[in-house]
Image (spheres, grey):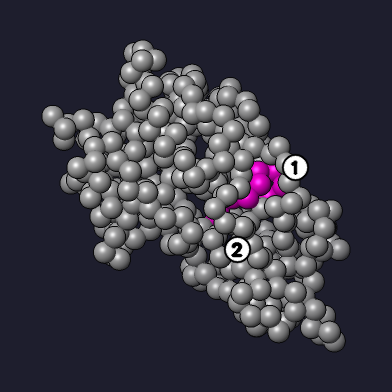
Amino acid sequence: MADKIFANSLSSLFGAVVALISSASAQSAEPDLDRIANFFSAAQVVRGPALTECKLSGGAETTCFSITVRPDPGDYEPGPWCPTAITDGPEAGGIWFLDGKTVDVDGNFITSLAKTFGDTKWKLYDPETGAVRFTGTLEACEAAARPDVDPNYQNYCVQCLPEYMPENTRLTYVIPLEPVTVARPVPTHHSGSGIAANGVRLDGPAPVDAILGAYTIAPFDDCGGHVNTHVGYHYHAVTGCVSGNETSLDPTKADLVKSHGGQIGIAMDGHAIFTHLMANGRVPEGLDMCNGHETEDLPYHYHAGEAGSNAILGCLAAQSGCVLPNDSTSCDASIPPRRP
């Protein structure tokens, strides 16, 4: 009986964290909301979790849970991103994606850009002083981070700092309690990939080509995150800063969760997201294009992509919910939101 309960819980929203919440009564939902709250105990939660009706990306109308958080990890200070001089070492900057791997954004990286990309127009530093050109104000950040980069900020290292965000900035995630399958995978560039246990957005791919096309570099910190003034601090890669959570509905099954590396977050379609590698250090076998698979001991779940791949998830295997500004919980994901 315990195995059946555990299997059903894993096939719902949280895989190893949240039990299947039926559409019956609020009384049966309360313990599951407690588990959701427990999973996000490290997040800066403003409101929730709470049950809400929602319309998913494929038009399905179902029951979701909503949780409102501040886009800040809380357990560490984000950054740094841009080095200030070409003599700076790795500790002064963040990371970038190159050939599917992460590389340090240090002084050597800055001076090697022309060679790295085979284009002599690259020069993010003053050759006389060795000072790196970086965005040091909110105005510069917004001008350089927009899709049509201000020409005055070409050949800049772009960083937007957490203090540029209003103090009351928050996001609300509305995620289906039970995944609703789709005929074709859902891209992650509208809703993002999901939310980490610490409350930070697990985003879709960063627009690397557009960034490089403007002769800019917008580094991620060593945790794979950077700041967008519309959504705050968020991840484009999962590194060791987000550890796997061993929480499970049935404590006797926690070893299964642990063996898969532990759960780091929840996808926008309600499936669990686990670490990139299994606990034994091996790459999970049989992953599909979305980075998901079903195994003998666990139902369908995702494993985060390799940090340098620019794809925490390749896609979503089920209909996605919403990420909303502030405290709104009215989710109609069938209407794609505008990207800032």
Give the percent coordinates (x, y) of residue 84: 75, 74
How many angstroms separate mark 2 from mark 1 (CA)?
21 Å
Label 2 sits on what residue type?
A: Asp
| Element type where label 1 sits in the image | loop
Label 1 sits on what residue type?
A: Pro
On the image, numbered disc 2 is attached to which residue?
221
Give the magenta range. Answer: 228-236
Compared across the picture, whether 246 is left or right of 147 comes to left
Q: Where, quadrant-wise, is the C terminus in this rendering?
A: top right
Q: Quadrant of residue 60?
A: top left
* Residue that extends furthest to the bottom in the rendered view of this protein: 128
Frontmost residue, 300 versus 43: 43
150 over 246 or under it: above or below? below
**In the rendered structure, does residue 326 fall within the stretch colored magenta?**
no
**In the rendered structure, does residue 231 fall within the stretch colored magenta?**
yes
Compared across the picture, whether 331 is left or right of 144 comes to left
For image coordinates 46% across by 22% down, the residue present is: 51
Give the percent coordinates (x, y) of residue 273: 39, 47
Compared across the picture, whether 16 is left or right of 107 comes to left
On the image, numbered disc 1 is attached to which residue?
166
Per the rendering, the mark at residue 307 is none
